[in-house]
Image (spheres, rainbow, N blue to C red):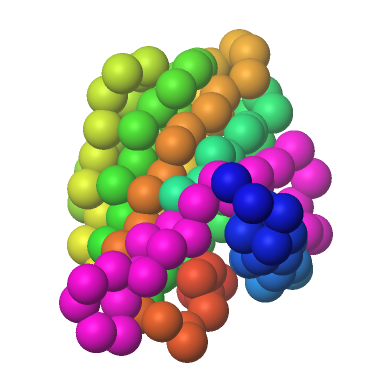
Amino acid sequence: MNATRLIAAAALIASATLTLQPALAQFTGLQRTDLLEHDLSIAGRKTVQTRVDFAPGTAAPAHAHPGEEIAYVLEGTLEYRIGDDAPITLQPGQSLFIPAGAKHSAKNVGSGKASELATYIVDKGQPLVVLTP
């Protein structure tokens, strides 16, 4: 990879990180690490891939995304709530599909750190995370 592409890739990752962190920055014990952001062949859509780390007992507050999310548990035990549905508990290696615009939350219900790989297929130009009441 030449220097220009490397600098452009670093700038893209840095700008994506700056736009995602403010929405969740106030929540102690929750860390997001953006891994990839790329336009799709579908006009107006992009994919974003993020690692989310949860300290023991930490919960991501109720929120939604302007597109679909696929959550894959890397370690620990995470409990997901989507809308008014019953909670779903996932272990490492298990995945969950979260529909576009669905209000949801996640909580580390294990005794140690928990992590997920979140892949989003979202509308460009929209905030990735929208906190909901």
**Is residue 51 positioned above or below 77 on the image?**
below
Q: Is residue 83 visible?
A: no
Q: Residue at x 28, y 69 (%)?
A: 40
**Residue 121 location (% of width, % of height):** 31, 63
Q: Does the magenta-highlighted stretch encompass residue 49?
A: no
Image quadrant in which you'd find residue 45: bottom left
48 or 118: nearer the viewer: 48
Q: Residue at x 48, y 65 (%)?
A: 63
10 or 92: nearer the viewer: 10
Q: Is residue 74 visible?
A: yes
Q: Residue at x 63, y 20 (%)?
A: 113
**Is residue 39 positioned above or below 70 on the image?**
below
Left or right of 49, for residue 46 = left
**Residue 22 location (% of width, % of height):** 74, 68
Left or right of 50, for residue 41 = left
Q: Which residues are magenta?
A: 23-48
Toward the front, the furthest residue is: 2
Image quadrant in which you'd find residue 95: top left
Q: How many marks?
A: 0
Q: Residue at x 64, y 51 (%)?
A: 2
**Residue 132 location (% of width, % of height):** 50, 74
